Amino acid sequence: MLTRAELKQRAKDSMSTASIHPVLVTLVFLLITFAVTGIISFISTIITSAIGFTSALAADYETVAVGGMLAMMPVTMILSLISFAITCVLQTGYLAYTLKTIRHQESGLEELFHYFKPIVKLFCLYFMVQLFTALWSLLFVIPGIIASYRYRMAVYLYLDDPDKGILDCIRESKEMMIGHKFELFVLDLSFILWILLCAVTCGLAALYVTPYATLTNSVYYDNLKYITSPQPVESAAEFVEM
């Protein structure tokens, strides 16, 4: 397994040789993600305000208010699910971009919008990962953290084989991360100063830190897949030879 310094250096090299700089792709990714979240939140606020205004005009205020809130619950849930689904697609596209970048494959902004067709499958994959993590979190915080690392590679595995089943991605991620969860946890901790820099700069540093950290994680996945696969994929083999 490559050292943390080697993983980060691979990520930096990929940033410098990318056809479209990761900072630009990250900027577009973050803007679209925030825009989607903001628009859906705005729609939810308008609907809530409309229900409140209707209730205020009604003679039986309490009855209308209660009925309005009950009617608002499924609407809010639907809007939240739509926001979650779109975020899943964009996040997957961003990971696909970083994975192709560290493999020196052609990739650009279009990668962000490439996964709207399998949006239902992606929704289910992310939902199941979060569900399993949440269930482990019920035991206490530490089991939840361990679970989050156990399923960390599920989306990457989907990207390498879109025909793979949802539970297969989760299961293979679990197997792949055996003996490597703490290793990845330490890798994440090594970015703590960068994260603090993001806070100090009111998030501006995130334009650099986000692609840097994500590319490093993609390098980690590629290297981990190589050393754990009985028959290394060609891209991973090329990665090690570089």
Image (cartoon, rainbow, N blue to C red):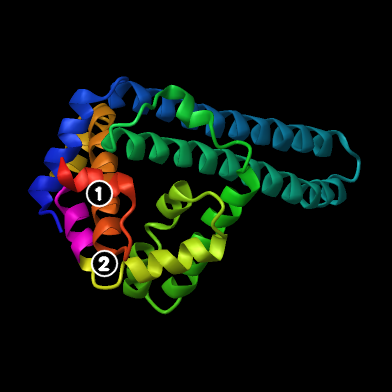
Q: Which amino acid does label 2 sit on?
A: Lys
Q: Image quarter for residue 149?
A: bottom left
| Vertical side of 240 occupied by 15: above or below | above
Q: Give the range drawn in magenta.
A: 183-192
Residue 167, percent from left and from top: 54, 65
Please name the residue that numbered disc 2 is placed on.
Answer: 181
Say whether residue 185 is magenta: yes
Q: Residue 237 carries which label?
A: 1
Label 2 vs label 1, nearer the camera: 1
Foreground residue among 18 and 149: 18
Residue 187, percent from left and from top: 18, 54
Give the residue drawn at x 28%, y 65%. 228
| Vertical side of 35 occupied by 99: above or below | below
Q: Image quarter for residue 18?
A: top left
Quick one: label 1, few (<14), some, or many (20+) residues within 10 Å? Answer: some
Going by the image, does 124 lie left or right of 169? right
Give the residue drawn at x 47%, y 42%. 92
Overall secondary structure of the magenta section:
helix
